[in-house]
Every structure is written in structure tokens, then in C-alpha cells.
């Protein structure tokens, strides 16, 4: 089977391309990426072909999807702070861009696996987060990802499009960049520790997250493509762990066998307080699935950074 990965030069996408390359049933892997946040270097050794361009380019998108048996839609304008700086740009890429992808898939009935975010739960305080909870986004980014999943799931009953939507929870691992204003917490902590700088914690640090190793995410996405898994509702892609940001800082320090200084700054607008997934639906769809532990995942990520992977 031939697979298109939008946003495939990003850190999740490139890890997915590596996973797809290991699957005997997968033939051509085509990546569509405008390289606004991804890097062509991430695809080295994957065998994937990179087409540089935007999902907003309707003609290019049609050409790329034409020979695909499945599309994994990861292309997005990420980051809550980035969406606060430019809400319209987040909407255009994440919402309008998704409709463009859906239209290209609809014309051929191409199976689509799309990425949403746990941020859609927003102000809902229930834990763990299960898919039947209401959604109350706290940022333009979260609202745009809610639009992503709503459009994708609507195309099933409306047009018969086979689709699956995953809600990602704080994915981390090798290839995730650091050293920029919108960097995620795990690479930011590791990068700061390597530089001997304080680890910046926004707020009191007792906010909790459900961290998911990128290798596990890549395997689930590849399985979904190969088995053509569909679901009428969104599916949490995380495993019910709950770790505070302060605890994460100490785990990073332990993994790196170094002392760290923690510097607190004001809480960031749009950030949720607590996040933890209910993984019941995920395990029904993917029985036997085993997650990589945070301990092992941090070890792999630190090894990648120390090998020069995180260098600017």
C-alpha cells in the first residue's frame, strides 16, 4: 500500500515514516510538508519522498493524494502560544487545511487518519479525560484542532469517507526540536540541562500531563493505516499516566545524572491545568498495545540529544 503523510517532516511524521519503512506491507511513502516547522533532514534514511508544499495548495494536494491508499494527516500549525500570537494563521492551516485534505481524500475514498489534540478538552476538569466528555477549548490552537476532528468525523456519515481521529497527549521523543520560543517541555528541559541552564517551569509546576513516547504513537498510526481502522468518535492516544511538570524536571535530571536548577515564570495563557487520558477506546481498537514507559522514553530522548540530534 502507498501512504501519504502530511507534515511528515515534523518530528512525529518522520518517526512515523521510519515505522512505515519497517512494514513489509507498505510500499511508497510520500511526505507533503512546507518545512515551516519540520526539516528535510528528519527524513534521512526513511526512504520517504518529500514533496515541499502546503496543504493549502489544492492542486498540489490533489496530485500528492492521487496514488495513495491512505493518508495520515499530521500537518498543522502547532503550539498554543503561537496561536495566541496569530489566531487566524492557526485556523487557516489547522481547520481550512484539514478540509482541503478531506476533499482530496473524498474524491477517491482514501482512508484518512488525522491528528487532533488533548487540548480540545480545555477547561473540562474531569480526570481521566474520556472521549464522551464535552470540549471547552482555551486557545485558538485548541479550537482549530477541534475543528480538525469535527470536520474529519463529519465526512464519514456525510460522504462515506473511512476516517480515524486521534487526540494526541504531549507526545515527546527523538527529533522533537528545542531552542525556540514554542518548544515543548521535554526537549526544552533536556536542552536546558545540557547547556547547564535553569529549567523553566511556567506556574507552580504542579500541573500534570500524560506524556506519550513518539515511538508508540508511530506504531499505533502505522497499525491504523495497515488495518484501515476507523471510528465514529475521536480516540485518545495516550495511556493514562499523570506526571507533574516538576516531577518531569526531576526525572529529566535523574536520567541525565545531573543537578538542575528550576526557574518559575508566570503561567501561560491557554494552558490546561491537568491532562490524563482514559485509554479504554484505544485498547479496544488496538488490543495488546504496550506503551513505552516515561523512564525508557526519556532515556532514548536524552541519548538522541547527546548524540547531537538536538543541535541547532
Image (cartoon, grey):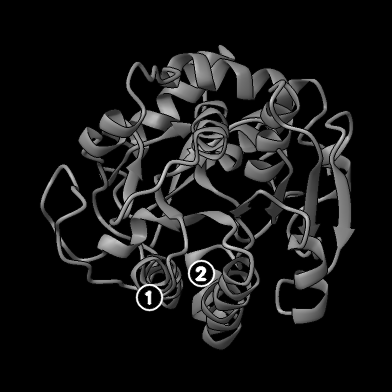
Of 74 and 244, nearer the camera is 74
Location of residue 56 (image quadrant): bottom right
* Residue appearing at x 42%, y 52% in the figure: 164
Q: Nearer the viewer, residue 74 or 137?
A: 74
Q: Which residue is mark 2?
A: 81
Residue at 72% in and 20% down: 24
Query: Is label 2 in a helix, a strand or a loop?
Result: helix
User: How far apart are labels 1 and 2 at the CA level?
Assistant: 34 Å
Residue 275 visible, this angle: yes
Residue 155, picture quadrant: bottom left
Q: Nearer the viewer, mark 1 or mark 2?
A: 1
Which residue is located at x 51 percent, y 69 percent?
A: 81
As helix, strand or loop, the secondary structure at mark 1 comes to helix
List x then y, in percent, for residue 220. Answer: 49, 32
Residue 147 position, x and y percent, is 41, 75
Q: For this view, does 36 lie left or right of residue 270? A: right
- Going by the image, does 308 lie left or right of 248? right
Q: Residue at x 32, y 44 (%)?
A: 236
Which of the pair 127/266 is nearer the observer?
Answer: 127
168 left or right of 71 in image: left
Q: Residue 258: in sight, yes or no?
A: no
Q: Which mark is residue 158?
A: 1
Amino acid at each position: 500500500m502507498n501512504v501519504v503523510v502530511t507534515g511528515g517532516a515534523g518530528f512525529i511524521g518522520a518517526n512515523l515514516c521510519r515505522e512505515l519503512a519497517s512494514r513489509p506491507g507498505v510500499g511508497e511513502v510520500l511526505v507533503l510538508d512546507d518545512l515551516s516547522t519540520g526539516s528535510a533532514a528528519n527524513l534521512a534514511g526513511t526512504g520517504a519522498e518529500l514533496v515541499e508544499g502546503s496543504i493549502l495548495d489544492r492542486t498540489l494536494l490533489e496530485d500528492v493524494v492521487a496514488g495513495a491508499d491512505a493518508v495520515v494527516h499530521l500537518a498543522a500549525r502547532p503550539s498554543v502560544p503561537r496561536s495566541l500570537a496569530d489566531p487566524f494563521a492557526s485556523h487557516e492551516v489547522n481547520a481550512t487545511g484539514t478540509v482541503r485534505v478531506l476533499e482530496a481524500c473524498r474524491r477517491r475514498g482514501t482512508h484518512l487518519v488525522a491528528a487532533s489534540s488533548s487540548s480540545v478538552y480545555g477547561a473540562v476538569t474531569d480526570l481521566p479525560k474520556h472521549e464522551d466528555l464535552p470540549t471547552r477549548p482555551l486557545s485558538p490552537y485548541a479550537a482549530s484542532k477541534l475543528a480538525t476532528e469535527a470536520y474529519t468525523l463529519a465526512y464519514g456519515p456525510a460522504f462515506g469517507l473511512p476516517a480515524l481521529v486521534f487526540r494526541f497527549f504531549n507526545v515527546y521523543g527523538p527529533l522533537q526540536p528545542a531552542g525556540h520560543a514554542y518548544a515543548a517541555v521535554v526537549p526544552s528541559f533536556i536542552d536546558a540541562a545540557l547547556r547547564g541552564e535553569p529549567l523553566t517551569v511556567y506556574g507552580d509546576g504542579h500541573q500534570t500531563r500524560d506524556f506519550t513516547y513518539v515511538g508508540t504513537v508511530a506504531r499505533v498510526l502505522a497499525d491504523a493505516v495497515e488495518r484501515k481502522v476507523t471510528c465514529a468518535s475521536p480516540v485518545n492516544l495516550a495511556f493514562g499516566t499523570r506526571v507533574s511538570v516538576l516531577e518531569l524536571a526531576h526525572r529529566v535530571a535523574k536520567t541525565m545524572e545531573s543537578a538542575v536548577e528550576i526557574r518559575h515564570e508566570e503561567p501561560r495563557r491557554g494552558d490546561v491545568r491537568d491532562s490524563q487520558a482514559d485509554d479504554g477506546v484505544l485498547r479496544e481498537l488496538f488490543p495488546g498495545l504496550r506503551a513505552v514507559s516515561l523512564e525508557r522514553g526519556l532515556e532514548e530522548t536524552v541519548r538522541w540529544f547527546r548524540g547531537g540530534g538536538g543541535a541547532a
